[in-house]
Image: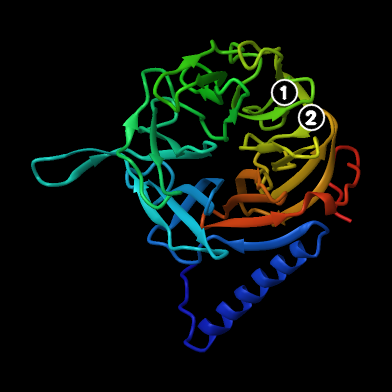
Amino acid sequence: MSGRRLSPFFVPVRIAILAFLLQTSFLAAAEQPGIVLREFIYNEAPFPECHASTIEETPSGLVAAWFGGTEEKHPDVGIWVSRQENGKWLTPVEVADGVQYVGVDGKPHRHPTWNPVLFQYPNGPLMLFWKCGPTPDTWWGMKAQSLDDGKTWSTAERLPEHIDGPVRNKPILLKSGVLLCGSSTEFDGWRVHFEMTSDQGKTWQRTPAIHDGKTFGAIQPTLLRHPDGAIQALCRNKNGEGSILSTISKDDGKSWSELTPIDLPNPNSGIDGVTLADGRHLLVYNHTHRGSGSPRARAMMNVAVSSDGINWKPALLLDNEAKAEFSYPAVIQKSDGQVHITYTWKRQRLTHVVVKPAELVLGEFKDGQWPLE
C-alpha cells in the first residue's frame, strides 16, 4: 500500500495530537506518589537514535551521557554528554568517537562506541568509561576524565588488554579506596566478572568469570550494598523468559556466590539499581518477558523497592506502551536524597525522572504480574 502525504492542514494537527498524548503520558506518570519531575534531557539532537544513558552528580550539578548516532552498531555512533545548569539540561555535546585513523583520502576510519558510564570521585575527577569496537564481543574499554564537572575532557585512553571497565552500570567505591566495577564479556558465552582499580583507572585487577556462561548467560551487573558489608550484583539474563540473576560477595568483590534467579522477570534487557541512604534498594527494570515474538519485551519501564535485595515490591510504572521500547535505565541517589533515573525512550530521546523515595507507595505483585490497577 503506497503512502499518502498529509495535507498542510493535517501536519500541525498531527503534531498537536502527538504533543497532547506525550503530555498526557507525562502527567499520568507524575501523578504517581514519589515522582517530582519527568522530562526529556533533549528534544532535538544531530543524531536520530540514542541509547544506554548514564547519570552522575558532580559538585556543580548533574551530568548525563549516552551513545548516539544513526543507529546502534553504526560507525558514526559517538558518546554524547549533557550537563545541567540552573536545573536545565544543556545542548548535548559529542565528547568521544570511535575514530581510529584518518585515511589518505581524508576520511576517518571509525568504529561504533557503546555503553558510557560516569563516576564522580569524591574530591577527584569525573570519570567517563565507554566501549569501542565493531561489536560487543570484540569491543575494548576506553576512559577519559574531567576536572571541571564535565565541561571539558582529557584525551581518550584505551584501557589495558582484557579490561573493559564498568561494562554498563556505575561502579561503587569501597572503603579501601578501590573502585569496584561490574563487567562482563560476550565472546565466549555471556559471562560476568568484576574489575577493580585503586588509582583512578591507571592500573587494574580482574576476577575470573564467576560462571561458565552455559547454565546462565548473564551480563551487565548492577551493584547493591548490604548492612553486613556484603555486595550484591543483579545481572541481566540472556534467557528472555527468565528472571534477573543475583550473586553475593562477602570479600569486597574478590569472590562471588553462584548466580541464582530472583522473582523479577528480565526480557534480556539492561537493569540498574542503587542502595538508598535509608538502607533500602531501588531497582529500575522492565517487568516483562521476551517470550516468543512478544511485542512487549521492553514496552514497560518499572521501579521496584526491596529491603533485602531478594524480595521486591512494585513502586512506579514509568512508561507502558505496547510495541514501544523503554530500556537501559540508569539510577543514582543525589546528596539531597532525591533519586534520578534516566532511560531510553523509543531510541529517540532520553527520559529523566526525579523521585522522592520516602514518598513512594509500595504495592504487591499479582501472580508475578505488575499491578496495573
What number is the disc on residue 246? 1
| Viewer-proximal residue among 289 and 138 | 138
Q: Is residue 336 above or below residue 211?
A: below
Furthest residue in direction left, as rendered: 104
Q: Quick check: marks 2 and 1 in contact, CB under 8 Å?
A: yes
Q: CA distance from mark 2 to mark 1?
A: 9 Å
Q: Position of residue 219 (x, y in %)?
A: 58, 26
Above or below, 249 against 37 in this view is above
The figure's colour scheme reads: rainbow
Residue 216 horizontal/vertical position (percent): 65, 18
Label 2 CA crowd tier, 10 Å (few <14, some 14–19, many 20+): many
Which amino acid, mark 2?
Gly
Q: Quadrant of residue 305?
A: top right
Q: Is 60 positioned to the left or the right of 19 in the image? A: left
Instruction: Name the foreground residue: 117 vs 139.
Output: 117
Q: Quadrant of residue 232?
A: top right
Decide which of tag 2 and tag 1 comes sooner along the chain. Answer: 1
The secondary structure type at the circle numbered 1 is strand
Decide if residue 224 is on the left or right side of residue 19.
Answer: right
- Badge 1 amino acid: Ser
Residue 209 lies in quadrant: top right
Residue named by callout 2: 309
Foreground residue among 72 and 291: 72
Nearest to the observer: residue 72 or residue 364: 364
Task: Using residue 91 as the reference point, say whether residue 268 is left or right of it.
Answer: right
